[in-house]
Amino acid sequence: MSSPTTLFLADLAPDIIFSVFALCDICSVVAAGQTCRSMHDLAFDRSVWRNLLRNLQRRSILDCTLAVNLETLSTDQMISIVRQLITGPQIWSPPGPDGAAVAEVSRKITLHLPTRTGPQRSQKKAKLLPSGLYVLVDNSGTVECWNVANNKLVWRHISAEGLEFAAEEDIELAIVVIILVFSRTGSDDNRRKGANFRSCVEIVSLDLQTGNHTCLLTVRAVDYNLNKPFAAPVICGTLAAVCINSGANAWMIINWKAQSYFIVQSPSPTLRVALVPRHIILMDHSVDRKTQVHLISNDTLRAYWAPTIDVAGPGKLSSVLAEAIPKLSTFQETSHQHSTGRLHIYIYPSPLREGEYRVWIHGRFLPQTCLYSYRLSIPSNGEPQWHARTPFRAMSISSIIHSVSYSGHVLRYRTGERWSLLFSSDKSVVNFLDGADSVMLGTYSGTLTHSMPSSIVIQYFK
């Protein structure tokens, strides 16, 4: 039965209805189109779906190169593009009766990069930005941004050792988190041992059109005698977070706009941090070693922020225990087996419904590596809701899960073997490109970005 709101909407002029649809997500538009014939015709008008896809591009969900000219696409073609964001490329299907998985490349782009000399090892690490138009590269300690279409260097930033980076992009501006360590002192022997590092986090705003960048923040972090003191940086809006490789299970949370920070610690070796708009997500273990995920509102963190310390300041920073931070909600997974190592969490916004996220958790649970999936809903008014999506998937313990896409495809590396892509089971595998230093899997587009010794190779699939 149609709701009173929908019946009222159907009585409005088409131009007004189109204006309302421009403020809606895909699920809301489709739901309205199911009420009556006239609403169906309006909901599936090409102009409505062009706006929906443009919104996905603004939200860094839709690769711009997958929908270059929206004006020429039919509604069915645009719906097909949205479907691919959810399921992965069409031919990423389970293998046929002969056991051979299929992954046909539709487009291959090769960027030839100059060899840089620097303190870093010669291996490259590349990240394709969500728009598909630019790629960030760690080229032997030099962070570079390249235009994919014309193989042109847009920007470069010479950093120091121990480099990690993450990025958040809109159509014209990328905010890039660069994690770096610098100002080493002491003897050559101490340097080789990684001693006397001064650790800093730098956040810059990069204009992709001009190649100009602005330093938003350079902050002193925690000093440890490690040549790679940071891992897993993330950024969302004005907040950034990075894991501190200290053995103390600690994360540094930074508000670059307010120039403030706090460090969260937990006795749990599985402490992980993820960021979504207006919220921080912490994952750790309960006392009985069950996996639990906490949703924390940014508004409850005011008491924990402290002014950032400049690079000349002391490298010992105060911290807060995760259990002391007020939680908006906590989800505990009782079906998990005891983990034997660190867990990893990925949280991706839904292309269909704003305020909804797909959550993937993976780790080693003897005697196998397991992958779990959940749905998180954070309504603007109402209680957050967690729902299990699928039973866990098991893989051999020798598998190292490198990343997981929104659709649930797994990028795997096995020691002594090639990088490979897993489908619905451990045997549904596509192997590819020997000799890659690293490989990145596109969250929604399903792109594979290979860092080769002298080039970056980007593959799209049908």
Image (tube, rainbow, N blue to C red):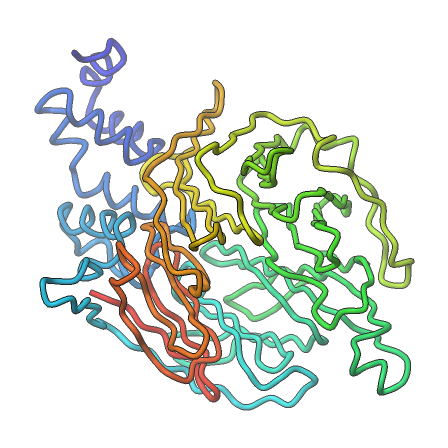
User: Is 202 left, or right, of 288 in this rendering?
Assistant: right
Give coordinates of residue 75: x percent, y percent.
15, 45
Give coordinates of residue 157: x percent, y percent.
65, 75
Answer with the quarter of the image where residue 427 lies. bottom left
Q: Is residue 453 above or below residue 180?
A: below
Q: Quadrant of the N terminus?
A: top left
| 387, 384: nearer the viewer | 387
User: Is 244 left, or right, of 140 in this rendering?
Assistant: right
Which residue lies at the image location 27% right of the left edge and 58% below the top edge? 423
Answer with the quarter of the image where residue 448 lies. bottom left
Answer with the quarter of the image where residue 226 lies. bottom right
Number of numbered discs visible in the structure rendering:
0
User: Is 456 left, or right, of 72 in this rendering?
Assistant: right
Q: Is residue 65 above or below residue 366?
A: below
Q: Is residue 245 above or below residue 12?
A: below
Which residue lies at the image location 66% right of the left edge and 55% below the top edge? 243
User: Is 191 left, or right, of 341 in this rendering?
Assistant: right
Q: Residue furthest front?
A: 367
Give coordinates of residue 245: x percent, y percent.
70, 60
| 220, 232: nearer the viewer | 232
Q: Is residue 49 above or below residue 127?
A: above
| 48, 292: nearer the viewer | 292
Give coordinates of residue 410: x percent, y percent.
36, 59
Which residue lies at the image location 57% right of the left edge and 32% below the top edge? 295
